[in-house]
Amino acid sequence: MNRRTFLGSSALATAGLALPSRPARAASGADLKFLFVFNTGGWDPTRVFAPEFSNRNVDMEPGAEPATAGNLRYVAHADRPSVGAFFRQNYARMLVINGVQVRSIAHEICTMIALSGDTSGFAPDWATIIAHAGSSQNTLPHLVLGGPSLTGALGTSVARTGISGQLEGLLSGQILDRSDIRLPGRLPRQAEDVVDRYLQRRAGARAAASRSQGDAALSGAYADAMDKALGLKDYRYVMDFTGGQGLANQAAVAVDALSLGLSRCVSLGFPGAGAGLGWDTHANNDEDQSTLFEALFSGLSQLMALLDATPGESSPSLADETVVVVLSEMGRTPQLNATLGKDHWPYTSVMMLGPGLTTNRVIGGFDERYYGLEMDLASAEPQPGGHVLSVESVGAALLALADVDPAEWVSGTGPLDGMLG
Protein backbone atom coordinates (compact mmCIF):
# COMPACT_ATOMS: atom_id res chain seq x y z
CA MET A 1 0.00 0.00 0.00
CA ASN A 2 1.49 3.37 -0.99
CA ARG A 3 0.86 6.55 0.92
CA ARG A 4 -1.78 7.88 -1.44
CA THR A 5 -3.78 4.69 -0.95
CA PHE A 6 -3.13 4.97 2.77
CA LEU A 7 -4.80 8.38 2.80
CA GLY A 8 -8.14 6.89 1.84
CA SER A 9 -7.95 3.94 4.20
CA SER A 10 -8.80 3.38 7.83
CA ALA A 11 -5.08 3.33 8.58
CA LEU A 12 -5.16 7.13 8.78
CA ALA A 13 -7.40 6.99 11.81
CA THR A 14 -5.32 4.18 13.29
CA ALA A 15 -2.17 6.25 12.98
CA GLY A 16 -3.81 8.98 15.05
CA LEU A 17 -2.38 11.84 12.98
CA ALA A 18 -3.39 15.36 13.95
CA LEU A 19 -3.96 16.76 10.46
CA PRO A 20 -5.65 20.16 10.14
CA SER A 21 -9.43 20.23 10.48
CA ARG A 22 -11.15 21.77 7.43
CA PRO A 23 -14.89 22.29 7.91
CA ALA A 24 -16.99 22.38 4.75
CA ARG A 25 -18.07 25.87 3.68
CA ALA A 26 -19.08 27.72 0.56
CA ALA A 27 -16.13 28.55 -1.68
CA SER A 28 -15.17 32.20 -2.03
CA GLY A 29 -12.19 34.19 -3.23
CA ALA A 30 -10.32 33.61 -0.01
CA ASP A 31 -10.92 29.86 -0.30
CA LEU A 32 -9.79 29.41 -3.90
CA LYS A 33 -6.67 27.37 -4.50
CA PHE A 34 -4.10 28.17 -7.19
CA LEU A 35 -1.81 26.00 -9.29
CA PHE A 36 0.84 27.66 -11.48
CA VAL A 37 2.59 25.81 -14.34
CA PHE A 38 5.67 27.69 -15.56
CA ASN A 39 7.32 26.97 -18.91
CA THR A 40 10.93 28.11 -18.83
CA GLY A 41 12.55 29.58 -21.92
CA GLY A 42 9.82 31.43 -23.80
CA TRP A 43 7.14 29.61 -25.77
CA ASP A 44 5.79 30.49 -29.22
CA PRO A 45 2.09 31.46 -28.90
CA THR A 46 1.56 31.11 -32.66
CA ARG A 47 1.94 27.34 -32.29
CA VAL A 48 -1.18 27.03 -30.10
CA PHE A 49 -2.78 30.19 -28.71
CA ALA A 50 -2.48 32.75 -31.52
CA PRO A 51 -3.87 31.70 -34.94
CA GLU A 52 -2.21 34.54 -36.91
CA PHE A 53 -2.78 32.92 -40.31
CA SER A 54 -3.96 36.17 -41.92
CA ASN A 55 -1.02 38.21 -40.62
CA ARG A 56 1.59 38.44 -43.38
CA ASN A 57 4.23 39.49 -40.84
CA VAL A 58 3.96 36.20 -38.93
CA ASP A 59 5.56 32.94 -40.04
CA MET A 60 3.00 30.29 -39.22
CA GLU A 61 3.97 26.63 -39.14
CA PRO A 62 3.57 24.51 -42.29
CA GLY A 63 0.73 22.03 -41.82
CA ALA A 64 -0.92 24.07 -39.06
CA GLU A 65 -4.60 24.95 -39.34
CA PRO A 66 -7.03 27.22 -37.51
CA ALA A 67 -9.38 25.35 -35.19
CA THR A 68 -12.14 26.17 -32.73
CA ALA A 69 -13.46 24.67 -29.51
CA GLY A 70 -16.48 26.48 -28.17
CA ASN A 71 -15.61 30.18 -28.49
CA LEU A 72 -11.87 29.51 -28.42
CA ARG A 73 -9.78 29.82 -31.59
CA TYR A 74 -6.46 28.01 -31.55
CA VAL A 75 -3.80 26.47 -33.80
CA ALA A 76 -4.13 22.77 -34.59
CA HIS A 77 -1.51 20.45 -36.07
CA ALA A 78 -1.41 16.72 -36.74
CA ASP A 79 1.76 16.44 -34.64
CA ARG A 80 -0.02 17.88 -31.57
CA PRO A 81 -3.12 15.75 -30.95
CA SER A 82 -2.99 16.40 -27.20
CA VAL A 83 -3.49 20.13 -27.80
CA GLY A 84 -6.72 19.65 -29.73
CA ALA A 85 -7.97 17.04 -27.27
CA PHE A 86 -7.30 19.39 -24.34
CA PHE A 87 -9.16 22.30 -25.96
CA ARG A 88 -12.15 20.15 -26.86
CA GLN A 89 -12.38 18.69 -23.35
CA ASN A 90 -11.77 21.89 -21.38
CA TYR A 91 -12.84 24.91 -23.45
CA ALA A 92 -15.85 25.62 -21.21
CA ARG A 93 -13.54 26.35 -18.25
CA MET A 94 -10.63 27.90 -20.20
CA LEU A 95 -9.49 31.48 -20.62
CA VAL A 96 -6.73 32.42 -23.10
CA ILE A 97 -5.09 35.85 -22.88
CA ASN A 98 -3.05 36.88 -25.93
CA GLY A 99 -0.70 39.82 -26.43
CA VAL A 100 0.47 40.08 -22.80
CA GLN A 101 3.46 42.41 -22.50
CA VAL A 102 6.47 41.44 -20.33
CA ARG A 103 8.59 44.57 -21.04
CA SER A 104 11.89 42.77 -21.70
CA ILE A 105 13.59 40.13 -23.83
CA ALA A 106 16.02 38.87 -21.16
CA HIS A 107 15.08 35.55 -19.56
CA GLU A 108 15.85 36.52 -15.95
CA ILE A 109 14.11 39.89 -16.11
CA CYS A 110 11.10 38.49 -17.97
CA THR A 111 10.79 35.71 -15.40
CA MET A 112 10.71 38.23 -12.55
CA ILE A 113 8.15 40.37 -14.38
CA ALA A 114 5.95 37.42 -15.36
CA LEU A 115 5.87 36.06 -11.83
CA SER A 116 5.78 39.28 -9.78
CA GLY A 117 5.42 42.33 -12.03
CA ASP A 118 8.73 43.61 -10.62
CA THR A 119 12.33 43.64 -11.88
CA SER A 120 14.18 43.96 -8.56
CA GLY A 121 14.13 40.31 -7.63
CA PHE A 122 13.01 41.27 -4.13
CA ALA A 123 9.25 41.16 -4.75
CA PRO A 124 7.34 37.94 -4.02
CA ASP A 125 5.59 36.18 -6.88
CA TRP A 126 1.82 36.01 -7.31
CA ALA A 127 1.58 32.52 -5.81
CA THR A 128 3.53 33.50 -2.71
CA ILE A 129 1.44 36.63 -2.13
CA ILE A 130 -1.78 34.64 -2.44
CA ALA A 131 -0.50 31.83 -0.24
CA HIS A 132 0.80 34.19 2.44
CA ALA A 133 -2.59 35.89 2.72
CA GLY A 134 -4.05 32.64 4.07
CA SER A 135 -0.87 31.17 5.50
CA SER A 136 -2.29 30.52 8.96
CA GLN A 137 -4.53 27.82 7.47
CA ASN A 138 -1.81 25.87 5.65
CA THR A 139 1.34 24.12 6.78
CA LEU A 140 3.14 24.85 3.48
CA PRO A 141 1.18 27.80 2.05
CA HIS A 142 3.15 27.84 -1.25
CA LEU A 143 4.68 24.53 -2.27
CA VAL A 144 7.16 24.75 -5.15
CA LEU A 145 7.59 21.47 -7.01
CA GLY A 146 9.36 22.93 -10.04
CA GLY A 147 10.10 26.10 -11.94
CA PRO A 148 11.29 29.44 -10.53
CA SER A 149 9.87 31.12 -7.46
CA LEU A 150 10.34 34.52 -5.84
CA THR A 151 9.82 34.73 -2.10
CA GLY A 152 10.65 38.36 -1.34
CA ALA A 153 10.08 39.01 2.35
CA LEU A 154 7.51 36.18 2.55
CA GLY A 155 9.96 33.29 2.62
CA THR A 156 8.28 31.65 5.60
CA SER A 157 5.28 30.88 3.37
CA VAL A 158 7.30 29.02 0.70
CA ALA A 159 8.95 25.60 0.55
CA ARG A 160 10.61 23.74 -2.33
CA THR A 161 10.59 19.95 -2.53
CA GLY A 162 13.97 19.84 -4.29
CA ILE A 163 14.67 18.17 -7.62
CA SER A 164 16.08 15.07 -5.92
CA GLY A 165 13.52 14.75 -3.14
CA GLN A 166 15.35 16.79 -0.51
CA LEU A 167 12.14 17.71 1.35
CA GLU A 168 11.04 14.08 1.52
CA GLY A 169 14.49 13.10 2.78
CA LEU A 170 14.46 15.85 5.37
CA LEU A 171 11.09 14.75 6.76
CA SER A 172 12.01 11.08 6.87
CA GLY A 173 15.54 11.66 8.17
CA GLN A 174 17.03 9.84 5.17
CA ILE A 175 18.81 13.02 4.13
CA LEU A 176 21.41 12.17 6.78
CA ASP A 177 22.43 9.21 4.65
CA ARG A 178 23.48 11.58 1.86
CA SER A 179 26.17 13.25 3.96
CA ASP A 180 29.85 12.61 3.18
CA ILE A 181 30.50 12.85 6.90
CA ARG A 182 29.61 9.88 9.06
CA LEU A 183 26.73 10.84 11.33
CA PRO A 184 25.18 9.05 14.31
CA GLY A 185 22.04 7.02 13.71
CA ARG A 186 18.64 8.66 13.80
CA LEU A 187 16.72 8.94 17.06
CA PRO A 188 13.82 6.58 17.68
CA ARG A 189 10.47 8.15 16.81
CA GLN A 190 9.44 8.52 20.45
CA ALA A 191 12.66 10.30 21.41
CA GLU A 192 12.44 12.49 18.31
CA ASP A 193 8.93 13.57 19.30
CA VAL A 194 10.16 14.58 22.77
CA VAL A 195 12.90 16.74 21.25
CA ASP A 196 10.47 18.29 18.77
CA ARG A 197 7.94 19.26 21.41
CA TYR A 198 10.66 20.73 23.62
CA LEU A 199 11.94 22.92 20.78
CA GLN A 200 8.39 23.93 19.94
CA ARG A 201 7.77 25.08 23.51
CA ARG A 202 11.08 26.98 23.61
CA ALA A 203 10.26 28.75 20.36
CA GLY A 204 6.82 29.74 21.64
CA ALA A 205 8.22 31.00 24.90
CA ARG A 206 10.90 33.00 23.09
CA ALA A 207 8.26 34.67 20.90
CA ALA A 208 6.13 35.52 23.94
CA ALA A 209 9.09 37.12 25.73
CA SER A 210 10.12 39.41 22.87
CA ARG A 211 11.11 42.92 23.96
CA SER A 212 11.07 44.82 20.67
CA GLN A 213 9.02 44.92 17.49
CA GLY A 214 11.85 43.49 15.39
CA ASP A 215 12.58 40.75 17.90
CA ALA A 216 8.90 39.87 18.06
CA ALA A 217 8.68 39.58 14.28
CA LEU A 218 11.71 37.29 14.01
CA SER A 219 10.96 35.09 16.99
CA GLY A 220 7.28 34.91 16.04
CA ALA A 221 8.18 33.80 12.53
CA TYR A 222 10.51 31.16 13.96
CA ALA A 223 7.82 29.86 16.32
CA ASP A 224 5.33 29.71 13.45
CA ALA A 225 7.87 27.87 11.29
CA MET A 226 8.50 25.38 14.09
CA ASP A 227 4.78 24.69 14.48
CA LYS A 228 4.40 24.12 10.75
CA ALA A 229 7.50 21.94 10.57
CA LEU A 230 6.11 19.58 13.18
CA GLY A 231 2.76 19.44 11.39
CA LEU A 232 4.56 18.76 8.12
CA LYS A 233 6.29 15.70 9.55
CA ASP A 234 2.88 14.07 10.01
CA TYR A 235 2.02 14.64 6.35
CA ARG A 236 4.83 12.36 5.23
CA TYR A 237 2.67 9.40 6.23
CA VAL A 238 -0.15 10.37 3.87
CA MET A 239 1.62 11.81 0.81
CA ASP A 240 4.86 11.56 -1.10
CA PHE A 241 6.77 14.78 -1.77
CA THR A 242 9.11 13.30 -4.40
CA GLY A 243 7.37 14.64 -7.49
CA GLY A 244 10.44 14.70 -9.70
CA GLN A 245 10.67 16.87 -12.81
CA GLY A 246 7.95 15.26 -14.95
CA LEU A 247 4.75 17.26 -15.15
CA ALA A 248 2.46 14.28 -14.49
CA ASN A 249 4.41 13.30 -11.35
CA GLN A 250 4.43 16.88 -10.10
CA ALA A 251 0.68 17.05 -10.73
CA ALA A 252 0.07 14.07 -8.45
CA VAL A 253 1.95 15.72 -5.57
CA ALA A 254 0.24 19.05 -6.23
CA VAL A 255 -3.25 17.56 -6.07
CA ASP A 256 -2.37 15.76 -2.84
CA ALA A 257 -1.08 19.01 -1.28
CA LEU A 258 -4.17 20.99 -2.30
CA SER A 259 -6.71 18.32 -1.35
CA LEU A 260 -5.17 17.75 2.09
CA GLY A 261 -5.13 21.47 2.85
CA LEU A 262 -1.35 21.36 3.13
CA SER A 263 -1.00 24.21 0.61
CA ARG A 264 -3.12 26.93 -0.96
CA CYS A 265 -0.78 27.45 -3.93
CA VAL A 266 1.46 24.99 -5.74
CA SER A 267 3.97 25.84 -8.46
CA LEU A 268 4.97 23.30 -11.10
CA GLY A 269 7.63 23.59 -13.76
CA PHE A 270 7.72 22.24 -17.30
CA PRO A 271 11.28 22.97 -18.44
CA GLY A 272 11.07 21.01 -21.67
CA ALA A 273 14.11 19.13 -22.87
CA GLY A 274 17.43 19.56 -24.60
CA ALA A 275 20.58 20.78 -22.82
CA GLY A 276 18.58 22.78 -20.31
CA LEU A 277 17.36 25.21 -22.97
CA GLY A 278 13.71 24.39 -22.44
CA TRP A 279 11.52 26.47 -24.74
CA ASP A 280 14.36 28.73 -25.91
CA THR A 281 14.19 27.71 -29.56
CA HIS A 282 16.64 30.01 -31.36
CA ALA A 283 16.98 27.21 -33.91
CA ASN A 284 14.58 24.56 -35.19
CA ASN A 285 11.62 26.41 -33.69
CA ASP A 286 8.77 24.57 -35.41
CA GLU A 287 9.76 21.01 -34.57
CA ASP A 288 10.98 21.73 -31.04
CA GLN A 289 8.03 23.92 -30.03
CA SER A 290 5.62 21.36 -31.44
CA THR A 291 7.20 18.57 -29.39
CA LEU A 292 7.15 20.71 -26.25
CA PHE A 293 3.52 21.78 -26.63
CA GLU A 294 2.43 18.18 -27.25
CA ALA A 295 4.18 17.03 -24.06
CA LEU A 296 2.87 20.01 -22.06
CA PHE A 297 -0.76 19.50 -23.01
CA SER A 298 -0.50 15.77 -22.43
CA GLY A 299 0.66 16.52 -18.87
CA LEU A 300 -2.00 19.20 -18.41
CA SER A 301 -4.69 16.70 -19.42
CA GLN A 302 -3.50 14.37 -16.66
CA LEU A 303 -3.47 17.27 -14.21
CA MET A 304 -7.06 18.28 -14.99
CA ALA A 305 -8.20 14.65 -14.81
CA LEU A 306 -6.70 14.40 -11.31
CA LEU A 307 -8.37 17.63 -10.21
CA ASP A 308 -11.71 16.40 -11.59
CA ALA A 309 -11.41 13.05 -9.82
CA THR A 310 -10.45 14.49 -6.42
CA PRO A 311 -13.25 15.65 -4.09
CA GLY A 312 -13.16 19.33 -3.22
CA GLU A 313 -13.45 20.94 0.18
CA SER A 314 -16.94 22.28 -0.47
CA SER A 315 -17.46 21.35 -4.12
CA PRO A 316 -17.89 18.11 -6.07
CA SER A 317 -14.27 18.21 -7.28
CA LEU A 318 -11.02 19.97 -6.54
CA ALA A 319 -11.19 21.41 -10.07
CA ASP A 320 -14.19 23.50 -8.92
CA GLU A 321 -11.99 25.19 -6.31
CA THR A 322 -8.65 25.48 -8.12
CA VAL A 323 -7.47 28.11 -10.60
CA VAL A 324 -4.79 26.72 -12.94
CA VAL A 325 -2.44 29.30 -14.51
CA VAL A 326 -0.14 28.22 -17.36
CA LEU A 327 2.47 30.72 -18.54
CA SER A 328 5.97 31.33 -19.88
CA GLU A 329 8.26 34.29 -19.29
CA MET A 330 8.19 35.57 -22.90
CA GLY A 331 7.13 34.81 -26.45
CA ARG A 332 9.03 34.29 -29.71
CA THR A 333 9.53 36.66 -32.62
CA PRO A 334 6.88 36.57 -35.36
CA GLN A 335 9.33 35.50 -38.06
CA LEU A 336 11.90 32.73 -38.31
CA ASN A 337 15.60 33.58 -38.24
CA ALA A 338 18.39 32.20 -40.43
CA THR A 339 18.56 28.96 -38.42
CA LEU A 340 14.79 28.39 -38.63
CA GLY A 341 14.46 29.45 -35.02
CA LYS A 342 12.68 32.34 -33.34
CA ASP A 343 14.28 34.81 -30.98
CA HIS A 344 12.99 36.55 -27.85
CA TRP A 345 9.81 38.67 -28.01
CA PRO A 346 8.24 40.83 -25.26
CA TYR A 347 4.63 39.70 -25.92
CA THR A 348 3.26 36.33 -24.89
CA SER A 349 0.10 34.42 -23.98
CA VAL A 350 -1.31 33.09 -20.71
CA MET A 351 -3.82 30.26 -20.31
CA MET A 352 -6.04 29.79 -17.26
CA LEU A 353 -8.69 27.32 -16.18
CA GLY A 354 -11.02 27.28 -13.21
CA PRO A 355 -13.63 29.14 -11.18
CA GLY A 356 -14.01 32.89 -10.97
CA LEU A 357 -12.85 33.53 -14.55
CA THR A 358 -14.73 34.57 -17.69
CA THR A 359 -14.17 31.27 -19.43
CA ASN A 360 -14.73 29.92 -22.94
CA ARG A 361 -13.13 33.16 -24.05
CA VAL A 362 -10.03 34.62 -25.69
CA ILE A 363 -8.94 38.01 -24.37
CA GLY A 364 -6.61 40.34 -26.24
CA GLY A 365 -4.69 39.61 -29.40
CA PHE A 366 -1.91 40.88 -31.68
CA ASP A 367 -1.83 43.70 -34.23
CA GLU A 368 -0.24 43.49 -37.69
CA ARG A 369 3.22 44.08 -36.14
CA TYR A 370 2.58 41.25 -33.68
CA TYR A 371 2.40 43.68 -30.77
CA GLY A 372 -0.24 43.18 -28.11
CA LEU A 373 -3.53 45.04 -28.53
CA GLU A 374 -4.41 47.90 -26.20
CA MET A 375 -7.26 47.07 -23.86
CA ASP A 376 -10.07 48.34 -21.69
CA LEU A 377 -9.18 46.69 -18.39
CA ALA A 378 -12.73 46.81 -17.06
CA SER A 379 -14.25 44.81 -19.92
CA ALA A 380 -11.10 43.06 -21.19
CA GLU A 381 -12.06 44.12 -24.71
CA PRO A 382 -9.67 45.72 -27.23
CA GLN A 383 -9.66 49.52 -27.04
CA PRO A 384 -7.36 51.61 -29.27
CA GLY A 385 -5.62 54.13 -27.05
CA GLY A 386 -6.47 52.06 -23.98
CA HIS A 387 -4.19 50.31 -21.52
CA VAL A 388 -1.26 48.10 -22.40
CA LEU A 389 -2.22 44.52 -21.59
CA SER A 390 0.64 43.95 -19.17
CA VAL A 391 1.45 40.89 -17.14
CA GLU A 392 1.14 43.15 -14.09
CA SER A 393 -2.55 43.69 -14.89
CA VAL A 394 -3.05 39.94 -15.22
CA GLY A 395 -1.23 39.28 -11.94
CA ALA A 396 -3.20 41.99 -10.15
CA ALA A 397 -6.43 40.37 -11.34
CA LEU A 398 -5.29 37.03 -9.94
CA LEU A 399 -4.65 38.71 -6.58
CA ALA A 400 -8.13 40.24 -6.67
CA LEU A 401 -9.60 36.84 -7.51
CA ALA A 402 -7.85 35.43 -4.44
CA ASP A 403 -9.34 38.18 -2.24
CA VAL A 404 -5.99 39.98 -1.93
CA ASP A 405 -5.87 43.77 -2.46
CA PRO A 406 -3.76 44.20 -5.63
CA ALA A 407 -3.01 47.85 -4.80
CA GLU A 408 -0.72 46.66 -2.00
CA TRP A 409 1.49 44.80 -4.47
CA VAL A 410 1.08 46.29 -7.96
CA SER A 411 1.62 49.93 -8.91
CA GLY A 412 1.33 51.78 -12.20
CA THR A 413 -1.61 49.80 -13.55
CA GLY A 414 -4.88 48.30 -12.44
CA PRO A 415 -6.09 44.71 -12.58
CA LEU A 416 -7.59 43.20 -15.72
CA ASP A 417 -11.00 43.09 -14.06
CA GLY A 418 -12.71 41.95 -17.25
CA MET A 419 -11.08 38.51 -16.99
CA LEU A 420 -12.95 37.86 -13.73
CA GLY A 421 -16.41 36.34 -13.64
Image (cartoon, grey):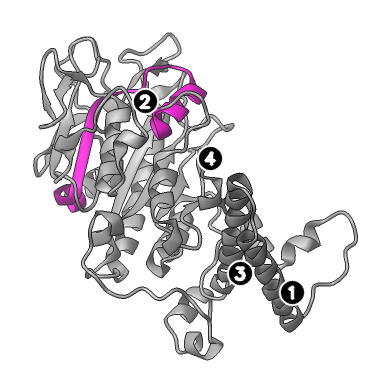
Q: Earlier in the sequence, mark 4 or mark 1?
A: 4
Disc number lying in front (3 or 4): 4
Residue 111 position, x and y percent, is 46, 29
User: Tags 4 and 2 in contact by the CB under 8 Å rule?
Assistant: no
Q: Residues within 10 Å of mark 4 (few under 14, many from 20)?
A: few
Mark 3, residue position:
230
Side (left or right) of 26 relative to 143 = left
| Magenta region | 89-117
**Label placed on residue 286:** 2
Residue 348 position, x and y percent, is 31, 26
Q: Quadrant of residue 110?
A: top left
Label 2's element? helix
Marks 4 and 2 sit apart, C-alpha to C-alpha, by 40 Å
Q: Is residue 244 in view?
A: yes
Mark 4, residue position:
153
Marks 3 and 1 sit apart, C-alpha to C-alpha, by 11 Å
Query: Can residue 290 be found in the magenta stretch?
Result: no
Q: Is residue 267 above or below residue 107?
A: below
